[in-house]
Amino acid sequence: MQYTYNEIPESVKAKPYFPLLANVWEVYQTYGWERTLKFIDESKMGVYDFFETRLNESINTSKLLIEGEFLYPEKVLSYILVIPSLTIRADLIQGTQKLLAGDSADMTFISLDDVTGEIFCLLNGHLEDGIPVDWWLVRPEDELLDRRHLKLGYKLREIPRRFNNVIKASEKLVDVFRDIRNERTPQWSTAAYYSASVWVSFALNVIFEPSNFESIASTFDGWAAKEQFKLPDYLFAFYPWPSMLNLFFLQGRTTFSNKISWLTTEGHLFLQPFEESTLQVVKTLHADIFALYQKGICEEGIPFPIQTLNSHFPNAKDKNNPDYRFQIKYPEGDFIQIDDLGLNFEEVLEGVYLDITTETPSSEKLDSSKVLSVGIGSGTKFR
């Protein structure tokens, strides 16, 4: 039995966006809403860990890079603070982040509860000259979320629900975030300020996505949710939109994905690691769902970059058929099989950087020579 869109309760704020989240949508279609809700609720703190891990890794990798600790920085992967759902090569961190965010900027990421629409957690990072130098995180129970907007009187946690419009809510939240920034670090009071809002399910979808190219494409889809597909709001949204990123979004899914891939890995495929703390929770509490993830990698395979770049939603205009509207279609050709690369599943969970690029045809015969490194950041092992 395959569960349908209409069986998701109307009270779920993130309902319109679930079919766009391929990994979460597969869980729902396989197990239904109650099981999916249990999975999201019990994995929520994994989203907090997801942000915390990526922040720490980004800052630590940048520090080690500056200190010259990496023998092959072009084979070391980390995370990009500007878009923490994406991975980036260590030697590209500074230049790319400076290009996208400017010389000095704060970025606050707002994670929204799928059911209530309220803030679940916050992550803030500060960039100087493209390097992450400071950060703070706010857990769901933190009293900061009970701080009120001076003019509106609303608690921070409830502002997204009150406005039901991510851009308007972000504008009001940034008013308060900027005050917090100026209290904590007055030396950066003139720095640019950006926020980015995502649903918890969007972050979970990324955690379960092994391909950096698929993660990049899903970031575009988060913008396209409103701009192209005319859903009620964005699934992923900056406020304000960084000018360079905004330009890339306007150029379409293929161009956006290609340009971001070159800015982050020079067009190379990276099989993204599964955050260790979340991995243990999912293995222990959701073995059936983890089995879906493992089957997808080990049996179905991973799309070549060229296949992701040329994938599309042929039924996107069919608004009356939400169950199939965002069913993605890939070009002809087999997907990448990890056995052909001489990899086992445990190595894939660590992260694998490959000599497979946007120029690699899906017909090319693969072998272990395509593996450049295994792991991420300071734990990278070179091949």
Image (tube, rainbow, N blue to C red):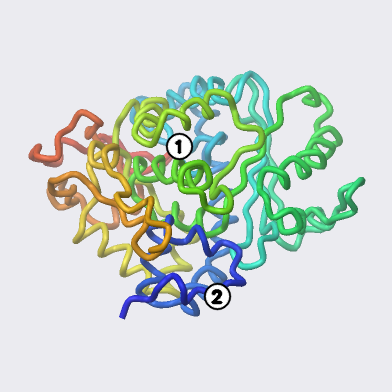
Residue at image coords 44%, 56%: 205
Quarter-of-image position of residue 375: top left
Q: Residue at x 26, y 60 (%)?
A: 296
Q: Is residue 14 left or right of residue 150?
A: left
Residue at (61% x, 32% y) in the render: 241
Where is residue 171 shown, x and y percent of the image?
Answer: 74, 40
Question: Amino acid under label 1?
Answer: Ser
Foreground of the two, 252 or 144: 252
Query: Which residue is disc 1 drawn over?
Result: 78
Front tag of 1 and 2: 2
Q: Secondary structure at mark 2?
A: loop
Task: Name the image quarter holding the N terminus.
Answer: bottom left
C-alpha distance separating marks 1 and 2: 38 Å
Q: Relative to 6, is 229 above or below?
A: above
Give residue 306's position: percent from left, percent from top. 23, 36
| Residue 85 x/y as whole percent | 49, 44
